[in-house]
Amino acid sequence: MEQMRFATKSDFDSLIELDASEYTTDWLVTNEFATVAWERNQEIYRVLECNGEIQGFIAFFPLEKSTFEALLAHELDENKLCDYIMPYKKGETVYIYLANIIVNQNHMDRKRFAKLIIQEIKNEINRVQTLDCNVGEIGAIAITDAGVRVLDNSHLSYSGKYPGYETVYVYRGTTF
């Protein structure tokens, strides 16, 4: 049985292991980063658990507009982003950076898990809005072919190449 839930600190080793299975060293998350980010907002990581094992996760980083813009323009290194994550507060506007969409590629149900995680992106954005927290914009950086496919099928629009990278792409929009 699958369930989506917020991550706890005890999940970080599993999240980092899944992250390392997908991304090159330039884009890897460290335990220190995950901890600092999570301490700023404990609602940023959503975990897909199946039979007690983590099979995937998504990371949503709420940011101020200037930080969001700097990140997508590659004027702010993603590795420094943990210091800029905001809590969700009633009446505040956040700009959500969709930092990770990860599924265990070795599991036989990976396609079903991917669909559940993609559905959860919409659910999470709706959840944030029900807190009376405004979502100004959603942005993502696609660094894998799978990421490009997911974002091409979302309501986010391709807005160009990520500066300094030939095959990394920026997507943004107001709905997922």
Image (cartoon, rainbow, N blue to C red):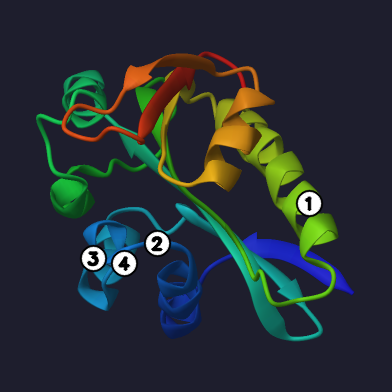
Q: Earlier in the sequence, mark 3 or mark 1?
A: 3
The Cα–Cα distance between marks 1 and 2, rounded to whole angstroms, is: 21 Å
Foreground of the two, 101 or 86 = 101
Task: Report the residue that reaches farthest toward the front.
Answer: 166
- Can you identify the residue that label 4 sits on? 34
Q: Which residue is mark 2?
A: 23
Give the mark nearest the N terminus, 2 or 4.
Answer: 2
Q: Position of residue 140 (x, y in %)?
A: 43, 32
Separation of marks 3 and 1 at Cα, in angstroms: 26 Å
Question: What label does residue 33 carry, if any?
Answer: 3
Q: Secondary structure at mark 3?
A: helix
Seen at 18% across and 54% down, the residue is 79
Q: Is residue 41 above or below residue 167?
A: below
Residue 80 place in picture, x, y as percent: 13, 50
Kind of residue sitting beneath label 1: Leu
Tag 4's secondary structure? helix
